[in-house]
Image: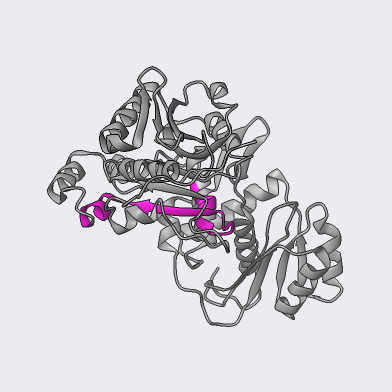
Amino acid sequence: MTTAIKPQFKWDRPYLYPLQEKSFFMPSRNKGEQYTRIICTEASTKSGKSFGALVWIAEQAFSAQTVNQTFYWVAPVYQQSKIMFRRIKSYLPPSVIERTNETDLTVTLKNTAVIQFRSASDPNALYGDDCYGAVIDEASRMSEEAYIAIRSTLTATKGPMRIIGNVRGRKNWFYILCRKAETGDDPEYGYNRISAWDAIDGQVLDRNEILSAQDALPENVFKELYEAEASDDEGNPFGHDAIHQCIAPLSKNVPVVWGWDLAKSKDWTVGIALDSEGYVCRYYRFQRPWKATKERIVDLVKGDPALIDSTGVGDAITEDLQRVLPRAEGFKFTQGSKQQLMEGLSFALSQQKVRFPQGHIVKELEAFEYEYTKTGVRYTAPQGMTDDAVCALALAVKLGGNAPGWGVW
């Protein structure tokens, strides 16, 4: 049985510039909760993310409600954790500290809360404790196994977590988790991005120093380190410049063709319609039972041409839809057919023959990748993400190329 205590400290939060503060104290969208439980922040080097995280973890420990609550700060290697251990010792007033341990890198407060500074070099060593709050520092340089271990320590306590780091390409768990948090689909997750220019506005970095770094460093290195933007990884079949050249507001014109990717398991049903100019004019993304999904598609498509995913269970769904949508066709996804479909979409993007708004479509296109296997080329979303919007867009583009009277292709 745990013993309840009353918080013993009057805490005046140090000044954090607005975006820095939001990265750690974002208001929650869940009723009854003050702050978002898990916040992912992609940030420029030296933008103040570590100081903000130290302020946050100290505030969590000050607010402990029972005795001997443990809080984690985890960095990729021991030396990085030791640096942050020494910093928090220098930041906290001696009157709130009961004791510190240089060997274990722990700070015990007067209210019995313990802040442990840990290394992620051995993920197995992170399991065990019930943790009441955690910071994952330099997340992009940490293994996914370590993240899973840290996340498990918060299960029983439902403790909050802050995950911070520089951007390092697109093929890592931190980048993928940030993209999931950025969608806003899960109210437990929040996302922030802090560039060097934001830190300049916050008076943390000097503009001339950043301009000097911009002149000295390769463009892709500067973008990742200072602008928190992932460089183009090999493996994206569309090209990020091509994607961004096709971004345009949602069209208000009437649909000419539809592409529908149907939900499987925890995926999303996505419907995308293109107008006669190749602009996305309708975009729907939802999770419903099959009966409600079919009713929704019928209501939206009406008499328009539609190309619908008929893979697996989608075959029966498409057959049902074709009974009331005479201009609907089915498309079965195989490795070969998906390759051809994505190559067609890639061509349309390179020629700017399709346009789409910012949001899920862009995020999925940016994350989409291909790899060579023994059986050919495999096109898919990274592990943990979906490609529903990409597939729906590709289906609409394919059908649009064959639609009578549509002069884009």
Which residues, given as a range, are shown in magenta?
Answer: 178-201
The residue shown at (78%, 58%) is 310
- Tell me residue 381's x, y (percent): 59, 46
The residue shown at (44%, 70%) is 248
Q: Quadrant of residue 287?
A: bottom right
The residue shown at (68%, 58%) is 268
Q: Image check: 216 left or right of 372?
A: left
Residue toward you, 91 or 373: 91
Is 184 contained in the magenta span?
Answer: yes
Relative to 31, is 277 above or below? below
Residue furthest out toward the left = 208
Q: Image check: 405 left or right of 112?
A: right
- Tell me residue 56's x, y (percent): 39, 46
The residue shown at (86%, 60%) is 316
Residue furthest out toward the top = 103
Residue toward you, 334 or 54: 54
Relative to 315, is 142 above or below? above
User: Coloring scheme of the render?
Assistant: one colour
